[in-house]
Each structure stands twice: as C-alpha cells, then as structure tokens.
Image (cartoon, grey):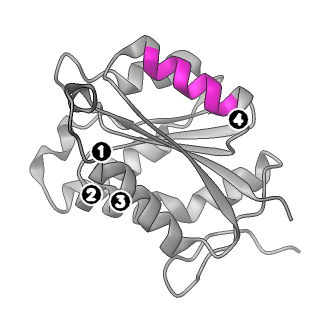
Amino acid sequence: MTKAKIGIVTVSDRASAGVYEDISGKAIIDVLNEYLTSEWEPVYEVIPDEQDVISATLIKMADEQNCSLIVTTGGTGPAKRDVTPEATEAVCDRMMPGFGELMRAESLKFVPTAILSRQTAGLRGDSLIVNLPGKPKSIRECLDAVFPAIPYCIDLMDGPFLECDESVIKPFRPKAK
C-alpha cells in the first residue's frame, strides 16, 4: 500500500516575524493522526500571506512532492492580506465549491462571523487542496464536516487509499453493487 503524502501549509505573516509557534498546522496534524489509521507522511510548510508564495508552495506540493491532499490554514478571512483562496483558485484545474459551502454552514452553528470566511477547495492534477480557517477549534469543526468525503475524493483521483478510525470519523464510500 502506498503511503499517502499530505501537505500542510500554515499561512501567516507572523511566521516571518521571528518567534512563532504554529498551533494551527499542528492542530491539522493532530486531527489527521486521530482520523487516519493508514500510513501517511506530512509535508509541512509555514509561509507568509503572499499570493505568489502560497501558489508556488501549492504547486510544489502537488506537482513535485506528490501530495494527494493539501490542507492550508489561515488567510481565508476578509483582511486585505488574506489571499489563500485566490492563490488556491489560481493553481487549481477545477474548483470544489461544496467544501467551502459545508465548512461555512458548519461554522455558522458556532459563530455568526462564519459568513466572513472564504474557505474553498479545488483540484490540481492528482491533488485535492482544501483551505481551512486559522483557529484550531474551527479547524477541527471544519475537518469533522468535510473529511468524510475526502478519502472517496482521493479514491476517485486514483490516489492512495486512506483508511480511517471509524470510531473517530467515518469516511463515505459508496457500496459496490
């Protein structure tokens, strides 16, 4: 069985400002470790809120490092420096708007400001790219909502088979007829 490579990209201007502890990227790794029972390898980067840097990182992870899934955190709000969705859209072949719609709907159960979030998702080659918010609590809520569809999406793109701890998260895969 092929070990899945999963890109984790933290987008933050604070990362280049000296001492910075990336709790958001680590939160993604923690959640994925809870979900996945199959072997996987994180490909991890912390980068500034600059569209060209974000796009170049996504391209490198998809095209060169062969990540079947790339998850970003940060840069999805309305601030002028929040350009993660634009960088994602610029490098994707096709967009997957249902991911962003579901994440916002789920987040609205907890905070009315979820309507300000611009999370999105798209496909680049053999990679699914998903933009998450920056707060660890929101990361968990959004991943809990969308992750059940991610293993099947990776299957449809002929990626590695992601096995999950079904007592934690139950992936949806259609039953064979």
In percent of width and height, residue 121 lies at 50, 37
User: Which residue corresponds to the image point at 57% horizontal and 77% vertical from the top-left?
Assistant: 170
Q: Quadrant of the C terminus?
A: bottom right
Q: Nearer the viewer, residue 120 or 42?
A: 42
Mark found first going from the N terminus, 4 or 3: 3
What is the spatial separation of the Cα atoms under label 1 and label 2, in whole angstroms? Answer: 8 Å
The residue mark sitting in front, 4 or 1, is 4
Which label belongs to residue 133?
1
**Outermost residue toward the bottom?**
167
Mark found first going from the N terminus, 1 or 3: 3
The residue mark sitting in front, 1 or 2, is 2
User: Which residue corresponds to the image point at 75% horizontal and 37% vertical from the top-left?
Assistant: 126
Contact between labelled residues 1 and 4, with CB atoms less than 8 Å apart:
no
In percent of width and height, residue 47 lies at 38, 28
Q: Which residue is mark 3?
A: 27
In percent of width and height, residue 106 lies at 30, 58
The residue mark sitting in front, 4 or 2, is 4
- Looking at the magenta stretch, what is its main secondary structure? helix
Which label belongs to residue 17?
none
Neighbourhood count class around disc 3 (C-alpha, 10 Å): few under 14, some 14–19, many 20 upward = some
Q: Which residue is mark 2?
A: 136
Amino acid type, mark 1: Pro
Amino acid type, mark 4: Gln
Please indicate whether residue 50 sits to the left or right of residue 2 in the image.
left
**Outermost residue toward the front?**
19
What is the spatial separation of the Cα atoms under label 1 and label 3, in whole angstroms? Answer: 11 Å
Contact between labelled residues 2 and 3, with CB atoms less than 8 Å apart:
yes
What is the spatial separation of the Cα atoms under label 4 and label 1, in whole angstroms? Answer: 24 Å
Q: Which residue is mark 4?
A: 65
Span highlighted in magenta in the image: 53-62
